[in-house]
Amino acid sequence: MPKRKDYLSWDEYFMGVAVLSSLRSKDPNTQVGACIVNTDHKIVGVGYNGFPIGVDDDEIPWEREGEWLETKYPYVCHAELNAILNAISSSLKGCTLYVGLFPCNECAKAIIQSGIKEVVFLSDKYSEADNTKASKLMFDKTGVAYRQLIPQHGSILLKLS
Ligand SMILES: Nc1ccn([C@H]2C[C@H](O)[C@@H](COP(=O)(O)O)O2)c(=O)n1
Ligand SMILES: [Zn+2]
């Protein structure tokens, strides 16, 4: 029998894991997932955007606007940072990060400091924001490569039963 031709590429597989992880997010507006992969194509960390452990999801609002302290922004831990903090490996040197949305400047700093060498993203919907511009400047200066994934498969069906 000939082998399957329609199998997922590595890029789609790891981005698929990032997108699946994003489904755990309770953010009503933007759900982001991230997946860190080492040079042996092994997943070493995953994460999604959510409040820190112990911060009650039901007490903090998911608002985008209003008094800063009453929005989600000061509290939410981004997918990339969670993936780094959740990593099973003590070193992320040379790893690739797959993420649904281009990293903000705070996550960019953590990505650089952890030794991740490549960022593969799906959406760059905040490309005009200063924090995205700062991320790109830092990645350019530190040699962290970044590229947008244009998937071959627009959707992946997961049958759970
Ligand atoms: N690269 C990113 C960018 C954003 N996030 C999180 C932070 C928020 O929970 C949400 C963005 O919310 P919005 O301003 O679009 O309502 O996504 C992230 O995890 N990683
Ligand atoms: Zn971030």
Image: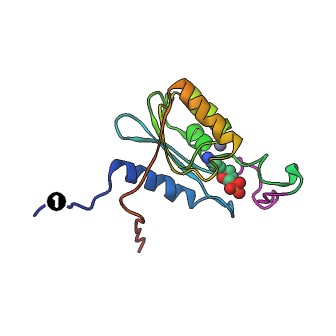
Does residue 51 belong to the magenta stretch?
Answer: yes
Q: Position of residue 41 (x, y in %)?
A: 36, 40
Color theme of the render: rainbow
Depicted 121 relative to depicted 60: above or below: above
Does residue 130 belong to the magenta stretch?
Answer: no
| Residue shown at the point (56%, 25%) measured from the top left | 141
Q: Is residue 129 left or right of residue 98?
A: right
Q: Position of residue 130 (x, y in %)?
A: 70, 40
Q: Is residue 137 left or right of residue 53?
A: left
Task: Kindly state the secondary structure of the residue where label 1 is placed.
Answer: loop
| Residue shown at the point (34%, 48%) measured from the top left | 10
Q: Residue furthest right?
A: 67
| Residue shown at the point (37%, 34%) measured from the top left | 39
Ligand 2 appears in which quadrant?
A: top right
Please tell me how crowded label 1 is: few (under 14), some (14-19), or many (20+) other residues with Cα within 10 Å. Answer: few
Which three-letter amino acid code belongs to the residue tagged 1?
Lys
Q: Position of residue 68 (x, y in %)?
A: 86, 49
Q: Is residue 28 left or right of residue 42?
A: right
Report the predominant secondary structure element of the magenta stretch: loop
Q: Is residue 71 left or right of residue 161?
A: right
Q: Residue furthest front?
A: 128
Residue 50 visible in this rendered orientation of the protein: no
Of the 4 image quadrants, the one containing the N terminus is bottom left
Q: Position of residue 128 (x, y in %)?
A: 66, 47
Q: Residue furthest left?
A: 1
The one nearer the camera, 142 or 112, is: 142
Instruction: Give the residues drawn in magenta, as a range.
Output: 50-65
* Residue underneath mark 1: 3
Ligand 1 under 8 Å from disc 1 Cβ: no
Residue 126 visible in this rendered orientation of the protein: yes
